[in-house]
Amino acid sequence: MTDERDLPPGPQADPEPARQATILDSREVQGPAEMAFLLVVLEGADRGMMFNLDGSSAPRVLLGQSAACQLQLSDPLVSRRHAALDLQGSALRLTDLGSTNGTYVNGVSVVEALLRGGEILKVGHTTVRVEPNPHATPAPASPAVSFGRFYGASPEMRRLYPLAEKLAQSAAPVVVEGEPGTGKEVMAEALHDMGPRAGGPFIVFDCAATPPLAREDELFGPESSGAEGRKGAFELADGGTLLIDEIGDLDLSLQAKLLRVIERSEVRRVGGSRWVKVNVRVIAATRRNLDQEVQRGTFREDLFLRLAVGRLELPPLRRRQGDVRFLTEHFWNELGGGAAPIPFELLRQFEDYPWPGNVRELINAVARHLAMGDVTLGSPHGPSSTAEPVVSEAAPGPVADVIQEILEMDLPLPRARERVVDVFERRYIERVLGKHNGNVVRAAAASGIARRYFQILKARQNVKR
């Protein structure tokens, strides 16, 4: 790994990289100080252009030829989506988006780099100087530690909340991006719940979970011969919000039909001839990098432009400074562990773990520890907590009886563990529903999980209430 201090100073003429460098780990960015940056085009077709990056429109901007880029260049050697720039406290993160001709910082070809001002950035025939901008006031971070029921107290999340608040009040389409488990669906629900459509339906259409041949019917509804047919996701969401989850999984032919529906605000059922007006706010979520998908030709640029009026990119948990501790404490209390303190060793273990499964993995780890008193992170060979269990054989009452019964079955450990977790999930769902008089929306909010996932658990555990 190369540090930016190893880069040669000043611009380099026509660099030919001997290597590709990935510069930085975001955990190297320390301190709460915010910085604004000024990008000045020194050479190329757009010489003299300046762009102020202060986070006022979004913490992340795109550089390239496409109209989707806030920093749009006319250089033919610059890719349509060439690179991304996002504020990271007192630094600027530069990420190459799989460009054709590469991205260079002070003559070194980079995939990712942290810039602090004074660097020379080269893309195609265009040279850009990166300068700190002391005269600009960076957009302030929110003092909030949550947005609706999306929780996070890190600087990375608090920089996103002001934009999320603006988008919640808008009817414009939004793209929510992030790795699996970062909370995209919870954020989409929060945008719905915190906006003027909160009283309307919130419908989720999951592209990844729907068989490809059934997607068109599920989105637009099938028209049955001699019958009224069945409503699709758009009609069900009329007056509210439709979340199209994992939109990057849609094939190109269906993307074209989706674009038409969004542009016309009317839908025609599959096999039908009548257009039905719908009033739907569309939020799209994806684990994919749609900028790169457009670059490859696997996602339509016109659909991307129509959807990405607003963009929220949720950072992975490993880049959210302080949020592992904050969220562990939050979920510990929400999942019923508040009477007992969090074991120090468990918290230390959690803070040292990279969380590839993000917040979803953290919730499961906390629930597993509360249910069984142990937790294994990552692979079967990963670290395992040795803290005292919250519930154990020696504990009095029905929980101990159930665990004893499972132990007496002499099952293999994985199957025995599943049985215990099933009991915990069922009792937890029953308890939280009871506290909220059977209201699934409030129970899901109190549980810290998406409404749809709560309903899946409720159905899986056969909870009637």
Image (cartoon, rainbow, N blue to C red):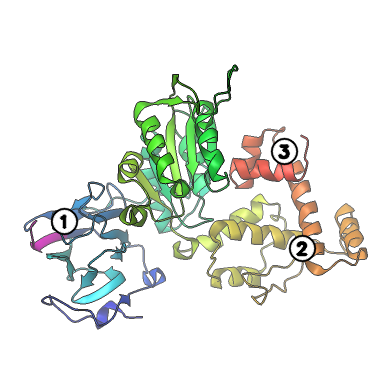
Location of residue 404 in the rendering, given as x and y in whole percent from the top left corner: 90, 62
Location of residue 258 in the rendering, given as x and y in whole percent from the top left corner: 41, 36
Q: Do the residues labelled 2 and 3 touch (CB within 8 Å)?
A: no
Q: Look at label 1 and name its amino acid.
A: His
Residue 40 among those drawn in magenta: yes
Classify mark 2: residues with Cα within 10 Å, few (<14), some (14-19) or many (20+): some
Task: Kindly identify the residue that appears in the image at 16 percent across and 79 percent down.
Answer: 9
Q: Do the residues labelled 1 and 2 touch (CB within 8 Å)?
A: no
Location of residue 58 in the rendering, given as x and y in whole percent from the top left corner: 31, 49
Instruction: Say left or right for 242 vs 43.
Output: right
Label 2: element kind? helix
Task: Kindly identify the residue that appears in the image at 24 percent across and 50 percent down.
Answer: 69
Task: Kindly identify the residue that appears in the image at 34 percent across and 46 percent down.
Answer: 300
Label 3: element kind? helix
Q: Can residue 171 be seen in this snapshot?
A: no
Q: Give the distance between the C-alpha atoms of the residues marked 1 and 2, in whole angstroms.
A: 55 Å
Q: Range of the magenta residues?
A: 39-46
Displayed quadrant of residue 230: top right
Residue 171 among those drawn in magenta: no
Q: Name the residue under label 3.
A: 433
Q: Name the residue under label 2.
A: 372
Q: Mark 1 points at which residue?
A: 135
Q: Look at label 2 and name its amino acid.
A: Met
